[in-house]
Amino acid sequence: MTDRLPPLTALRAFEAAARHLSFSRAADELHVTPAALSFQIKSLEEHLGTALFIRLNRAVELTEAGRGLAPGLTEGFRALNTAWQAARRQADDSTLVVTAGPAFTAKWLAPRFYEFARAHPEIDLRFTATLKSLDFGRDEVDVAIRFGIDKQEPGLWSLPLVGEWVAPVMTPELAARYPTPQSLAEATLIHDGSIDFLSPRSDWAAWFRMMELDIDATHGPRFTGADHAVDAALAGAGVVLGRRALVVKDIHEGRLVMPFRRAIGLQARFRFVCQQGAETKPQIVAFRQWILDEIAKTSHISDDLEITPIEDIPQ
């Protein structure tokens, strides 16, 4: 046995075989023949001076030495792959992978991204819609649009976007039927449960308290997805307490109206997030500036809006 490290190909062959406990499946993964993989593992065992597998009739099992070696190699190859992917992304200035929640993707990014594509045909824009906080290295993500309370995250660069509010919005037809806040007592109230995790809650009950109205806010359909709640309002099914980012385009283009001009200011907002140091990459700079420009196009909708912070509303 020698202290010199064995060839990387032999270590890779062993790691795959230990993970699958099958030479044939490991060979398929590595695109080699089972005989070639078996040869690599045999050479590794000779290098180590002990067996790594117990070879059975139709299966293999790890020896004690194999069980000791396998976890470290799996972690090591995972780290190598993460570093390699990070280096590739750093060198790639033509692809931009963006992750955001399903509602923000559907209601903000998707209806607008053609403008970015038209202005930047050299950038291949890709979206991943998920509520999970993806890992920039492991999940090969360049930019995340995240919603929550402003906070500093180690290793990440973050830009808070415009403040968020919620206010009653509805179709123009429903606005004619419910001309005053008091008349909402007769309306179908659509509930967006996507921000129920915030405390205190910015829901219909809070809005009615802000307006000093004694109206039952327990009735009406409830949605876990904000985009579904907005879609229901667009269909004329009722009045939704709409979140700024998800309704401003529909308000701007006349599909929805906000007749009462009173809103609850949220504690949370959207943030533009990327890895520390990546904020100067050309495609990230271009995407960030495009988002800020798009926000500016509808900023006038909040101009004469009276916004009361949720913490100032009696509970």
Image: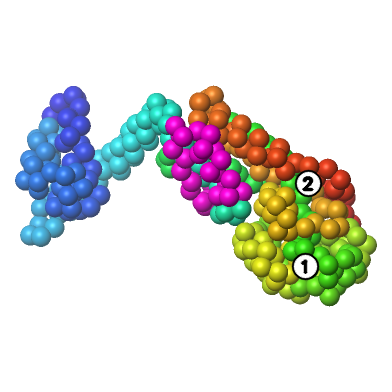
What amino acid is labelled 2 in the image? Ile
State the image quarter where residue 146 is shown: top right
Secondary structure under tag 1 reads: helix
Secondary structure under tag 2 reads: helix
**Is residue 174 located in the magenta-colored stretch of the structure?**
no
Q: Nearer the viewer, residue 235 or 165?
A: 235
Q: Nearer the viewer, residue 71 or 187?
A: 187
In front: mark 2 or mark 1? 1
Q: Is residue 296 left or right of residue 12?
A: right
User: In the rendered image, which residue does mark 2 sit on?
Assistant: 301
The percent position of residue 42, horizontal first and vertical second, equals: 9, 40
**Marks 2/1: CA–CA distance:** 20 Å
Q: Nearer the viewer, residue 69 or 174?
A: 174
**Is residue 131 located in the magenta-colored stretch of the structure?**
yes
From this view, report whether residue 266 is shown above or below residue 72: below
Can residue 66 be seen at all in this image of the molecule? Answer: no
Graded by Cα atoms within 10 Å as few (under 14), some (14 to 19) or many (20 or more), the crowding at tag 1 reads few
The extreme right residue here reads 212
User: In the rendered image, which residue does mark 1 sit on?
Assistant: 173
Q: Earlier in the sequence, mark 2 or mark 1?
A: 1
Q: Is residue 141 left or right of residue 154?
A: left
Graded by Cα atoms within 10 Å as few (under 14), some (14 to 19) or many (20 or more), the crowding at tag 2 reads some
Residue located at (17% from left, 30% from top): 7
Residue located at (83% from left, 43% from top): 303
From this view, report whether residue 175 is shown above or below residue 314: below
The percent position of residue 211, horizontal first and vertical second, equals: 91, 60
Residue located at (88% from left, 61% from top): 209
What is the span of residues highlighted in magenta in the rendered image? 108-136
Say whether marks 2 and 1 touch (CB < 8 Å): no
